[in-house]
C-alpha cells in the first residue's frame, strides 16, 4: 500500500468521484483518471499475475507499453478482455478484473508455481511434452494458458462502420516532434492527420511541461491543432496506429468511450513517425516486484493525476531524464533517493539524496517492494522507479520495411534513413530532448525557416546499461511472458543463438505487449552471452499489430451474414411461404427442404415423390454465361473438354471445363441457342471462375472483337420440373405443346404469357425434366403457374437435400464434392475427347502426362452396402493384408426409391475393381461394401423421356 | 494493401485483382509434340524475379487482363498497359 493521492494538482476533477470495482472490491477515483491512475492512488499494488509463474505483478508504465496491468473490463454490460489499465478511462460503475489469477490477483492459488520455477526452464513445453502420452496434459495446460476471459454470451456491439480516409501527410504521435511536423505541414496548406494514442495531444509535454515559442506549451499545441484543422486536416486522440501496410496504407483503432470503437484505414501520401521512445527497465534481482515502475511513469502519474507512486522512493538510472522525476516527487513530499550509475552526473534536485556511481542489485520483498540493495547497502524504500535508457518506438518504421542502426551515443537502435517510406522525427529517431524533437519535427513536416524554440536544456545524456551476467537472483527481461536473464543464457547455451530462435524458444517478446520494454534488453543480453555486438545480434521482425486490437473493432459490422453475404434467390419470399428451410449451398441461400419435421425424413419423402410423380425446384443459382459472336464456337471449343462447335443450334451437350493441369474445374451443359450464341452453364459456386477462364482465353488467345462473354445468371429465374409427371405438369401450367414435346437435350426459345421463355430438356435427376427460364422479374408468375398445376399431378417442391439424393442415385457428380484437386475427366469415365480430339483445348496436354496415364488413378465408382448410409469421407481399405487407403466415400445417401444406401466414391483403379468388396473404415470400425458402377438407378435410362 | 492501376478503370485496391501469369509465357502446342518436361515447365516454372517483374493481371471487376510491371521488393507499380493489340 504505497501509492497516494496528493491533495491538489493534476488534470482530474476532485469534485467528481467515480466508484468502480477491481477484483470485486470497491474503489473510488475521480473524473479524468485512468483505471491505472485510480488503482495506483488507492495503494493497490498487485494488479495481475505473471503468465508462467503466477508471480504478483504491478503497474509498470503509462500507456500501450504496459506489460503487467492487463485487465478484463466490464463497462455498461459489455466485457472487453485484456485491456491495458493505462489506456482505460475511468467511468462510474466500471468493473475490472485481473487476468491469469484465480480467484483474484491478491490471492492467486496458482502462485505455488513460482516455487517450481527451477523445473520450468526456457523451452519447458518443448522439452517436457514430447512423450507419447503428452496429450493427457493438454487439457490442463490449455486451461491455464491465455490471459483474460472471453464471455461467450457477450457479443460486443459492432455498430461503428469502418472508415476510410486520405491524408497528404499522416503524423503518428502528437508529442513535440509530431506537433512541430503537423504545424509546419498544415501551414503549407497540406491536409494533415495527426494521430495520438493518448487521450490528449502533447506527448511528454503533458507531464514534463515546458515553454515553446516563449509561451506555455499548451498554447503551442492548441495553435497546432487549430492550424491542422483549418487546413482541412484532423487531430485524432485515443487512437492507436497499429499497422503499416503497402502503398501508404495505415490502420488505426479509435477508442470512443460509450460510442463504440472505430476502425480507420488511412491512405497517406507521406508519413512522419513521431511515436516517441519508451523507457527501458533496469536489471536487478526481483526487478518484477510490484512497486518497481518506470521512472517516467512516476512523473506521468504525479503531474496528470496527482498520484505519487510511493512515500520512500528510490530512483535508479544512468541518464538525465529521471532527475525531473526525482525532483518532482521530493517536492510532492516523498522521501527520494536517486542512484545514478554514472560518476559524472548533473546536480541533485532539491530535497533529493543523490548517490553517484551507484547501482541497484536487488529489490527485496515477497509480494511488493520493501527495500532495495544499492552497492551492498540496504535502503528502506517502498517504491523503485527505474530508467535503463530509452528505446525509440520504431515498430511502424520497421513494419514498413525499415532497417535500424545502433546509435552508440544514445545507446539506441534508430531508423536508418531512406529504408522505409516515411520520415522519423524526435525521440523515435533517437533525438531525446525537447529542442531536438521540435527541430526534427519541423524539418520532417516540410517546415522552412527556424523551428519553434523551446526554453529547455540540451539533449539528455545517456550511459548504456546492460543486464549483468555476473549478478545473481532472478532478473526479469520480459515481464509479460516471464523470461529471465537465466532463460536467455540457457537458450544461448542450448544453441539458440539467433535472435529469432531465442524469441521462439523463450517466448521473449511474444506477449501481447510485443516485448516493447523487453526486446532491447533481450537482444543486449543475448549479445552479451554470445560475445557479439548488439548490431551483429540483430532484431526480430516487427509485424502488425503494434498493439493488441480487439477483433470486433477490425471486423466492425462485417460479421455473421454480413461477413460474406450469401446470394439470394429472387423467389426467396415465395419459397418461404411454402415452408422452405434455408441453407448456404456454395454461397447461395437455397431451400434445403420444405415443411416441418425431421430434415432427413423430409428429404426422403421429397425425393420419393419426385420419382413417383414429379418434383419442382429452383435452379436459378445455376450459372448462365452467354458466349456471343462469330468467334463463339471456337472459344467454347477451346475452353471445354467436349467439342461444342459440332452442336446444332437448339441442342445441348454435357461437358467439362478443365484447368491447364487437366483437373476438372467444373461441369455443366452447354446450350447452342444460335449459330453465334452459346449458353454455358456453370455450377452455382463456380460461375465467377468459369467466366474468368472464358475471358482469359478470349483476351489471350482469340480476337476479342469477335466474341463476347456475358454472365447473365442474375437475369433469369430458372425453375425445373422433373419426374414422370413433368410433362403433364407444365401443360397444366399453360406452357406450350411445342415445349412439352421437346426431345432430350433440346432447347427452345419461345414465349409464355407474353414473356420470353427458354426451355431445355436437360436432366440432373435422370427423370424426364424441363428446365424453364424466364426473365427474373417474371419468375413469380412462372412459379405461381407451376405451383397451381402441382396438385393435379401429385408433385411437390423439393429442396437441395432431395435433389442431392436424386442425382447421386444416377451417379451424376458434383465437381468439388465427388472430385478433388487431381480428378481428370477420364477418372469420371469420360474418355472420348481425350482419345479422339485432335484440336487444342484447355488442359489437353496435361491429360497425357505419366501421372495422368497411371493405371492406379482414383476413379469414380458407386458403393453398395447393407444397413445405414456409409459415412462421407470414410476411406476404402483392402479387406485383407496391410491396411491402406484405396480412396474415399464422396457422397452417400439412403435411396428411398431403391430402399437401400447408395454412395459414390473415388477408388484407386475403381473400374478394375467392379464387383469386388472393400472395407469402409471409419472411426475404428470397418464395414463391407461392394464396388459397383456409379449409376445405381435406372442405368438403361428408360425414365429419361417419361 | 497495394494499389494497382487497371488501364481501363484506373487505380483500385489490390483485392479487386488476380494474378494471371508471368508475361511472355507462350503456351506450348500442339500437345502431341510437347514433351512432359516442357509442359511441366510451362505449368509450374516461374522466374519469380526479385525486383522488376512483368506480369499479367486481371481486374476482376471489369474482367480485363493487362500487363503490369512492378517491383517485387519495393512493391512499386512501374507501368500498366492493355494487352498487345488492345486499347484501354
Image (spheres, coloured by chain):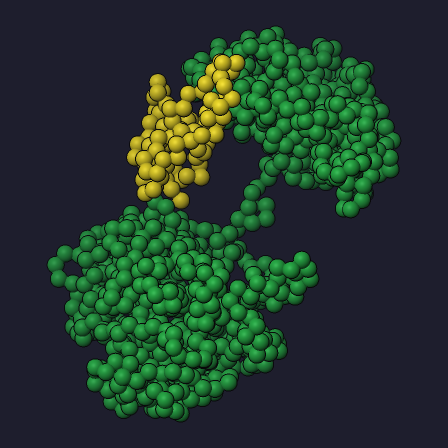
Q: Is residue A251 left or right of residue A579?
A: left
Residue A936 versus residue A836 in the image, above or below: below
Q: Residue A279, percent across and down? A: 34, 71
Residue occupying the point 79% across, 16% down: A941
Residue A581 versus residue A663 in the image, above or below: below
Residue occupying the point 77% across, 20% down: A767
Q: Is residue A819 visible?
A: yes
Residue toward you, A740 or A80: A80
> Quick one: quadrant of the C terminus of chain A?
top right
Residue occupying the point 33% across, 83% down: A359
Q: Is residue A347 left or right of residue A239?
A: left
Q: How many marks?
A: 0
Q: Residue A833, percent across and down? A: 61, 14
Colour of chain B as rendered: yellow
Q: Quadrant of residue A868?
A: top right
Residue A411 versus residue A247 in the image, above or below: below
Q: Is residue A236 left or right of residue A652?
A: left
Q: Is residue A530 left or right of residue A559?
A: left
Q: Quadrant of residue B45?
A: top left
Q: Residue A838, percent across and down? A: 55, 10
Residue occupying the point 52% across, 82% down: A27
Residue A909 versus residue A564 in the image, above or below: above
Q: Quadrant of residue A66?
A: bottom left
Q: Is residue A626 visible?
A: no
Q: Residue furthest left?
A: A449
Q: Residue B75, percent across and down? A: 34, 41
Residue toward you, B88 or A349: A349
Colour of chain A as rendered: green
Amino acid at each position: 500500500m504505497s501509492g497516494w493521492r496528493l491533495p491538489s494538482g493534476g488534470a482530474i476533477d476532485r469534485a467528481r468521484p467515480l466508484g468502480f470495482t477491481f477484483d470485486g472490491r470497491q474503489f473510488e477515483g475521480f473524473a479524468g483518471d485512468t483505471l491505472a491512475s485510480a488503482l495506483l492512488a488507492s495503494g493497490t499494488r498487485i494488479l495481475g499475475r505473471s503468465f508462467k509463474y503466477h508471480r504478483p505483478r504491478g503497474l509498470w508504465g503509462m500507456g500501450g507499453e504496459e506489460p503487467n496491468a492487463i485487465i478484463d473490463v466490464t463497462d455498461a454490460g459489455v466485457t472487453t478482455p485484456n485491456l491495458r489499465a493505462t489506456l482505460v478511462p475511468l467511468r462510474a460503475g466500471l468493473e475490472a478484473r485481473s487476468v491469469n489469477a484465480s480467484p483474484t490477483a491478491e490471492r492467486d492459488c496458482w502462485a505455488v508455481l513460482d516455487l517450481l520455477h527451477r523445473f520450468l526452464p526456457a523451452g519447458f513445453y518443448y522439452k517436457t511434452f514430447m512423450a507419447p502420452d503428452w496429450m493427457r496434459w493438454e487439457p490442463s495446460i490449455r486451461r491455464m494458458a491465455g490471459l483474460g476471459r472471453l464471455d461467450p454470451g457477450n457479443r460486443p456491439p459492432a455498430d461503428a462502420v469502418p472508415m476510410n480516409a486520405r491524408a497528404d501527410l499522416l503524423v503518428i504521435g502528437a508529442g513535440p516532434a509530431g506537433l512541430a511536423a503537423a504545424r509546419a505541414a498544415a501551414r503549407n496548406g497540406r491536409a494533415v492527420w495527426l494521430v495520438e494514442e493518448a487521450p490528449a495531444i502533447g506527448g511528454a509535454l503533458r507531464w514534463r511541461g515546458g515553454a515553446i515559442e516563449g509561451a506555455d506549451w499548451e498554447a503551442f499545441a492548441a495553435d497546432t491543432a487549430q492550424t491542422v484543422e483549418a487546413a482541412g486536416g484532423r487531430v485524432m486522440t485515443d487512437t492507436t496506429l497499429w499497422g503499416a501496410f503497402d502503398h501508404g496504407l495505415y490502420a488505426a483503432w479509435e477508442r470512443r468511450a460509450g460510442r463504440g470503437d472505430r476502425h480507420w484505414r488511412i491512405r497517406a501520401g507521406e508519413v512522419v513517425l513521431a511515436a516517441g521512445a519508451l523507457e527501458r527497465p533496469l536489471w536487478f534481482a526481483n526487478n518484477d516486484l510490484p512497486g518497481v515502475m518506470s521512472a517516467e511513469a512516476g512523473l506521468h502519474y504525479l503531474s496528470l493525476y496527482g498520484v505519487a507512486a510511493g512515500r520512500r522512493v528510490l530512483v535508479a538510472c544512468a541518464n538525465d531524464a529521471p532527475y525531473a522525476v526525482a525532483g518532482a516527487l521530493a517536492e510532492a513530499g516523498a522521501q527520494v533517493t536517486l542512484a545514478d550509475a554514472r560518476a559524472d552526473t548533473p546536480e541533485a534536485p532539491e530535497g533529493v539524496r543523490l548517490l553517484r556511481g551507484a547501482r541497484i542489485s536487488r529489490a527485496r520483498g515477497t509480494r511488493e517492494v520493501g527495500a532495495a540493495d544499492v552497492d551492498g547497502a540496504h535502503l528502506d524504500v517502498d517504491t523503485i522507479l527505474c530508467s535503463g535508457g530509452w528505446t525509440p518506438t520504431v515498430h511502424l518504421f520497421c513494419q514498413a520495411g525499415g532497417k535500424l542502426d545502433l546509435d552508440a551515443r544514445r545507446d539506441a537502435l534508430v531508423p536508418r534513413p531512406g529504408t522505409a517510406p516515411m520520415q522519423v522525427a524526435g525521440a523515435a529517431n533517437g533525438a531525446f530532448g525537447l529542442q531536438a524533437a521540435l527541430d526534427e519535427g519541423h524539418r520532417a513536416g516540410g517546415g522552412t525557416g527556424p523551428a519553434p524554440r523551446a526554453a529547455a536544456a540540451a539533449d539528455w545524456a545517456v550511459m548504456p546499461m546492460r543486464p549483468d551476467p555476473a549478478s545473481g537472483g532472478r532478473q526479469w527481461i520480459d515481464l509479460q511472458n516471464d523470461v529471465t536473464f537465466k532463460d536467455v543464457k540457457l537458450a544461448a547455451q542450448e544453441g539458440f543463438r539467433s535472435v529469432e530462435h531465442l524469441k521462439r524458444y523463450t517466448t521473449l517478446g511474444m506477449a501481447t505487449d510485443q516485448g516493447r520494454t523487453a526486446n532491447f534488453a533481450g537482444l543486449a543480453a543475448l549479445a552479451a552471452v554470445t560475445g557479439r555486438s548488439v548490431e551483429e545480434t540483430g532484431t526480430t521482425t516487427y509485424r502488425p499489430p503494434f498493439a493488441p486490437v480487439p477483433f470486433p473493432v477490425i471486423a466492425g459490422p462485417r460479421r455473421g451474414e454480413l461477413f460474406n453475404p450469401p446470394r439470394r434467390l429472387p423467389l426467396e419470399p415465395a419459397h418461404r411461404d411454402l415452408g422452405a428451410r434455408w441453407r448456404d449451398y456454395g454461397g447461395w441461400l437455397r431451400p434445403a427442404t420444405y415443411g416441418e419435421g425431421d430434415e432427413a425424413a423430409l428429404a426422403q419423402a421429397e425425393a420419393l415423390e419426385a420419382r413417383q410423380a414429379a418434383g419442382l425446384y429452383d435452379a436459378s443459382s445455376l450459372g448462365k454465361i452467354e458466349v456471343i459472336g462469330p468467334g463463339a464456337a471456337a472459344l467454347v471449343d477451346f475452353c471445354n473438354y467436349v467439342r461444342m462447335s459440332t452442336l446444332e443450334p437448339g441442342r445441348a451437350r454435357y461437358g467439362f471445363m478443365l484447368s491447364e493441369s487437366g483437373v476438372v474445374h467444373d461441369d455443366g451443359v452447354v446450350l447452342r441457342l444460335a449459330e453465334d450464341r452459346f449458353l454455358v452453364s456453370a455450377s452455382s459456386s463456380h460461375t465467377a471462375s468459369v467466366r474468368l477462364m472464358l475471358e482469359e482465353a478470349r483476351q489471350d488467345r482469340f480476337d476479342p472483337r469477335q466474341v463476347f462473354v456475358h454472365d447473365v445468371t442474375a437475369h433469369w429465374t430458372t425453375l425445373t420440373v422433373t419426374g414422370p409427371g413433368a410433362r403433364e405438369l407444365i401443360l397444366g401450367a399453360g406452357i406450350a405443346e411445342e415445349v412439352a414435346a421437346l426431345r432430350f437435350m433440346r432447347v427452345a426459345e419461345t414465349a409464355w404469357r407474353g414473356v420470353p421463355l427458354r426451355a431445355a430438356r436437360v436432366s440432373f435427376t435422370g427423370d424426364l425434366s424441363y428446365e424453364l427460364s424466364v426473365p427474373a422479374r417474371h419468375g413469380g408468375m412462372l412459379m405461381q403457374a407451376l405451383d397451381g398445376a402441382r396438385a393435379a399431378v401429385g408433385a411437390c417442391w423439393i429442396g437441395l437435400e432431395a435433389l442431392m439424393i436424386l442425382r447421386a442415385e444416377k451417379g451424376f457428380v458434383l465437381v468439388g464434392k465427388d472430385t478433388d484437386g487431381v480428378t481428370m475427366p477420364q477418372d469420371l469415365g469420360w474418355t472420348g475427347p481425350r482419345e479422339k480430339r485432335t484440336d487444342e483445348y484447355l488442359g489437353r496436354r496435361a491429360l497425357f502426362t505419366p501421372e495422368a496415364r497411371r493405371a492406379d488413378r482414383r476413379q469414380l465408382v458407386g458403393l453398395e452396402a447393407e444397413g445405414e448410409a456409409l459415412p462421407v469421407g470414410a476411406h476404402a481399405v483392402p479387406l485383407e493384408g496391410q491396411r491402406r487407403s484405396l480412396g474415399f466415400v464422396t457422397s452417400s445417401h439412403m435411396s428411398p426409391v431403391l430402399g437401400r444406401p447408395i454412395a459414390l466414391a473415388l477408388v484407386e483403379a475403381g473400374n478394375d475393381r467392379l464387383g469386388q468388396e472393400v472395407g469402409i473404415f471409419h472411426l475404428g470400425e470397418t464395414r463391407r461394401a461392394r464396388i459397383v458402377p456409379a449409376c445405381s438407378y435406372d442405368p438403361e435410362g428408360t425414365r429419361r423421356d417419361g | 494493401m497495394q494499389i494497382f492501376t487497371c488501364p481501363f478503370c484506373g487505380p483500385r485496391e489490390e483485392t479487386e485483382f488476380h494474378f494471371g501469369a508471368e508475361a511472355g509465357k507462350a503456351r506450348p502446342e500442339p500437345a502431341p509434340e510437347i514433351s512432359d518436361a516442357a509442359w511441366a515447365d510451362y505449368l509450374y516454372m516461374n522466374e519469380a524475379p526479385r525486383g522488376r517483374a512483368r506480369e499479367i493481371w486481371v481486374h476482376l471487376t471489369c474482367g480485363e487482363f493487362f500487363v503490369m510491371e512492378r517491383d517485387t521488393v519495393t512493391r512499386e507499380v512501374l507501368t500498366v498497359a492493355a494487352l498487345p493489340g488492345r486499347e484501354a
